[in-house]
Image (spheres, helix red, strand yellow):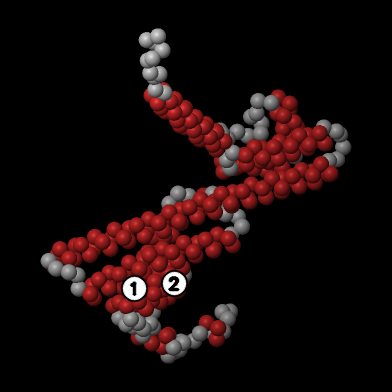
Amino acid sequence: MADATLPTPGTVGIKAPERRSWLTVEIARMRDAARGRAAARKRATSRKKPIGLLHVDDAQFQKAALLVASTAPQEFGKLDEIILRGRFVLRGEDVATLDELVHEAVRIAAIGFDSPGPHAAEMTALDGRISYATDFLERREGEIARRRYARGLLGGVTMTFFLLVVIGAGGAAVITLWRHGPMPVDQSEALRDVLVAVGAGAAGACVSVMLRMHRMHNLTIESAARGAAIYRIFLGWFFAAAVVFFLKSGLLSGIFTVPDDHVASWFFWGAVGFLAGFNERWATNLISRGPGSTADAAHGHTAQGSTPDAQKPPAT
């Protein structure tokens, strides 16, 4: 009877560990799934050792490759170059697709070359498969190069704005400490104008390169090497800063009129920096003008004694 009157133990202390253990299991499961997906992506994108068509483990395919190499050595060399280039450039499913295209071309050509007689039809078919594989490789390589270059450009622009914030804050702090007081308005505006123009120059360089890439059909992976996009952003910096310095110094005062309004001046220097980074030829022509010819050039006139290129007679 005494045992019947005892209170039943509470269940709160039992359910909490169960909830904690379930949460631990779920977190571990999600962690393992994430690791599995990362390992699968790594295996899919891992590089394979580049090997030619004659260095494969399949004896039957190697026999077919030898037959094609002896019958059509020039076409076989093109196929070998395609597959070696593809394994160097492509990743994942693209490598498997290109391998299948090339291997199937070798197998079909070997079947036709195995019979005696002229092989005009087989050679035509082989050339068509080589063209298709080449187009596939160039198209995928161009897409990969464009994505890689675009990532580099966007990374360079992001780095630019981060550096501008650091330089602006550091420059203001140094000038304030040097003067033992607040920065003068003219110096703060000059610093602002340079930073705005440099940031816009980086954006202009990014837009210029991205537009050019869309007009390039055979873009190679070497042209999108690491750091190539950053160098283009640096050029945008330098061109924008050079134009600002020339305008601020008064050497090009006859070409542009800097607005006096605070907001309009901000937009003006942003536009000048963007144009300098977007079109380096415009910036180069602007900087290379002499002080005496700036006013005439601004109004569309040429210097005395000079003849426009369109009016010059063709060289004989």
- Marker disc for residue 275: 2
Q: Pinpoint residue 192: horizontal percent, then vertical percent.
A: 30, 70
Q: Residue at x 23, y 76 (%)?
A: 186
What amino acid is at disc 1?
Answer: Val
Q: Is residue 78 above or below residue 244?
A: above
Q: Residue at x 41, y 88 (%)?
A: 296
Q: Does residue 80 appear in the picture of this structure?
A: no
Q: Mark 1: few, some, or many residues within 10 Å (few <14, many ≥20)?
A: many
Question: Which structural element holds mark 2?
Answer: helix
Quadrant placement of the C terminus: bottom right
Q: Residue at x 46, y 27 (%)?
A: 22
Q: Residue furthest front?
A: 1
Q: Is residue 119 above or below residue 154?
A: above
What amino acid is at disc 2?
Answer: Leu
The image quarter containing residue 291 is bottom left
Q: Is residue 259 above or below residue 120?
A: below
Nearer to the camera, 208 or 120: 208
Q: Is residue 263 above or below residue 90?
A: below
Dot 1 or dot 2, earlier in sequence: 1
Quadrant placement of the N terminus: top left
Q: Pinpoint residue 68: horizontal percent, then vertical percent.
A: 75, 35
- Marker disc for residue 185: none
- Marker disc for residue 244: 1
Q: Does residue 273 appear in the picture of this structure?
A: yes
Q: Residue furthest bottom?
A: 304
Nearer to the camera, 122 or 181: 181
Q: Real-space Cα distance between discs 1 and 2?
A: 12 Å
Nearer to the camera, 311 or 214: 214
Q: Pinpoint residue 248: horizontal percent, then vertical percent.
A: 30, 77
Q: Pinpoint residue 229: horizontal percent, then vertical percent.
A: 45, 55
Nearer to the camera, 161 or 107: 161
